[in-house]
Amino acid sequence: MDRPEVSLVVPVYNEEDVLPRFREEPLTILRELGRTFEIVFVNDGSRDRSAGILTELKAEIPEVRVIHLDRNHGLTSALDAGFRRARGEVIVSIDADLQNDPADIPKLLEELEDCDMVCGWRRDRQDPFIKKLSSRIGNGWRNWRMGDDIHDTCSPLKAFRREFIAFLPPFDGMHRWLPAIAKMSGLRVKEIPVRHHRRDTGKSKYGVWNRLFKGLSDLRAVKWMRKNRLTYTTREQE
């Protein structure tokens, strides 16, 4: 099968109320891009009707692929599996809850023309206060300790060239550090404001404070990777 130009990777965990919406706006937007594409859903051990709905979507939509994890492993594993199974030259990630607006995907792809990764910044984030506060604390701490300037490193909406996959370390929690990992790998990273909507069905599947403390504790590991990364170059004698 020919490699599509764009892969949309969507991690799924108990999202039976939202998944049917992928028949509508996300699919329409991707078809209007004028590029070949695929949608890679990764079922992260859902316990509701998500698996059955994904089967229906795959039967209805030729561009849909469905990857099933053996059990619930968490967001990092779901994204990693989707990224590594994606066939596109460009990979876009978005959460299944569609709080990020699929209409921003063309803007990310346009900005990707002169860099290697584009991160969506939920500048006007429509989440409960505690969730926004924990995110602000986490982003501020990471930026201070890493000397970084990304406002919203955990934003689900990102686009990057497939070459980035080679730099992904296979460890839990690394999805929170994708911009930092890209930068330390010598890739060009850009951040742009994107829209964000309130969740109108279902509920968030990932905790707030446990996610915050896990991200802060991972900082030491990422700093170690940056400090000890091999940076040599070679030249073969003629």
Image (cartoon, rainbow, N blue to C red):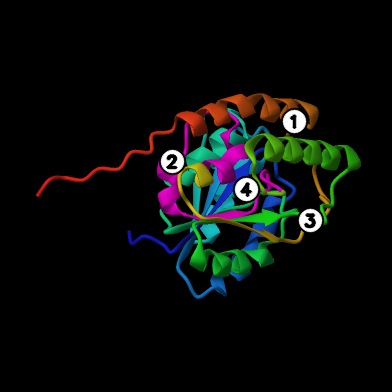
Marks 4 and 3 close (CB-CB < 8 Å): no
Rendered-image quadrant of the N terminus: bottom left
Q: Earlier in the sequence, mark 1 or mark 4?
A: 4
Determine the CA span between mark 1 and mark 4.
31 Å
Q: Which mark is residue 212?
A: 1
Q: Are marks 3 and 1 in contact (CB under 8 Å)?
A: no
Mark 2 in CB contact with mark 4 (< 8 angstroms): no
Of mark 3 and mark 2, the one earlier in the sequence is 3
Q: Is residue 167 left or right of residue 207?
A: left
Circle 3 packing at 10 Å, graded few (<14), some (14-19), many (20+), is few
Residue 175 painted magenta: yes
Which residue is disc 2 drawn over?
167
Tell me: residue 121, above or below residue 147.
below
Q: Which residue is mark 4?
A: 53
Q: Amino acid at mark 1?
A: Leu
- The residue closer to the viewer here, 11 or 126, is 126
Residue drawn where x is 9% and y is 50% of the image: 238
**Real-space Cα distance between discs 1 and 2?**
24 Å
* Local SS, label 2: helix
Q: Which residue is mark 3?
A: 123
Q: Which residues are magenta?
A: 152-181
Within 10 angstroms of label 2, few (less than 14), some, or many (20 or more) residues? few
